[in-house]
Amino acid sequence: MNMLEFENTSALDIELAEKVVGLLAADIESTGTASLVVSGGRTPMGFFHLLSQQALDWRLVTVTLADERWVDSEHTDSNEKLVRENLLINEAHQAQFISLKNSAANAVEGEADCELALAAIRRFTVVILGMGDDGHTASLFPAADALTLGLDMNSGRTAIAVTPPAAPHERMSMTLPRLLNAQQIIIHISGAGKQDVLKAAQAGGDVTELPIRAILNQQVAPLAIYWSK
């Protein structure tokens, strides 16, 4: 695990954008395509804007989300809306996008189509994850009924419906094995509160208590943590 600390979010955003575009460019050079998994929330907004301005053959890049709320893509809580308005702009407007929200009435009914859509992407180039104050990542929430399935490395599943115990909206989340099928995983966090959660996660091993531990403790994919004060 590689831990990088920054004095402010601006410094982090610059270095993270350079790192990610380098990984994407290298994958395009070696395989002809690249893929990027991102997360929603306020933390990545500055990073999204910087990344969107980077020179890259974005036509060869597929972008998708680690998780999504089961809401319309124009809903204010939609991660897809956030990504389209803040990342898939400027140079990056030519990137392909795979939505985790489809026309099914609910996330459970939408699982099969979502897994089919994700099957179009081989091993991810880069997966960028956030972390909640409760230690969740993607929509793998502590105490969620679907958590055991989501963390099962032998489930054969790539996406599952999740009903968060204390957060609004049903969700679609990538599973742990699908997230780990990546050349590089990056945890992107900021603030002292998130650092405290990270330290607690590093100090224990119960993944059901703090699901981010499943990412921290795995030996499947290279991991870097980008944290700013």
Image (cartoon, rainbow, N blue to C red):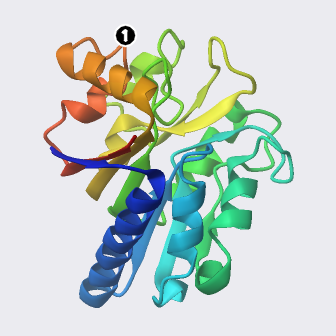
Image vertical order of residue 158 relative to residue 167, above or below: below
Q: Residue 123 appears in which quarter of the rendering?
A: bottom left
| Res 153 seen here | no
Q: Quadrant of the N terminus?
A: top left
In the displayed structure, would residue 136 be above or below residue 40? Answer: above
At a point 50% along the width and 72% down the height, the residue shown is: 51
Position of residue 189 measured from the top left corner of the image (x, y, whole percent): 42, 41
Crowd class of label 1 (few under 14; some 14 to 19; many from 20; radius 10 Å): some
Between 15 and 38, which is closer to the camera in this rendering?
Answer: 15
Q: Is residue 157 visible?
A: yes
Give above or below for 104 relative to 20. Answer: above
Q: Residue furthest front?
A: 7
Question: In this image, 91 relative to 121: left or right?
Answer: right
Question: Observer-nearest residue: 112 or 143?
Answer: 143
Residue at figure coordinates x 24%, y 86% from the top left = 30
Task: Tell me what residue is drawn at x 50 percent, y 20 percent.
Answer: 141
Residue 211 relative to residue 132: left or right = left
- Nearest the eye: 111 or 166: 166
Question: Which residue matches tag 1?
Answer: 209
Image coordinates of residue 155 in percent, x first then y, are 35, 31
Q: Position of residue 14 (x, y in %)?
A: 41, 68
Tell me the quadrant of the picture where the C terminus can be found: top left
Query: Does dot 1 land on a helix, a strand or a loop?
Result: loop
Above or below, 120 relative to 177: below
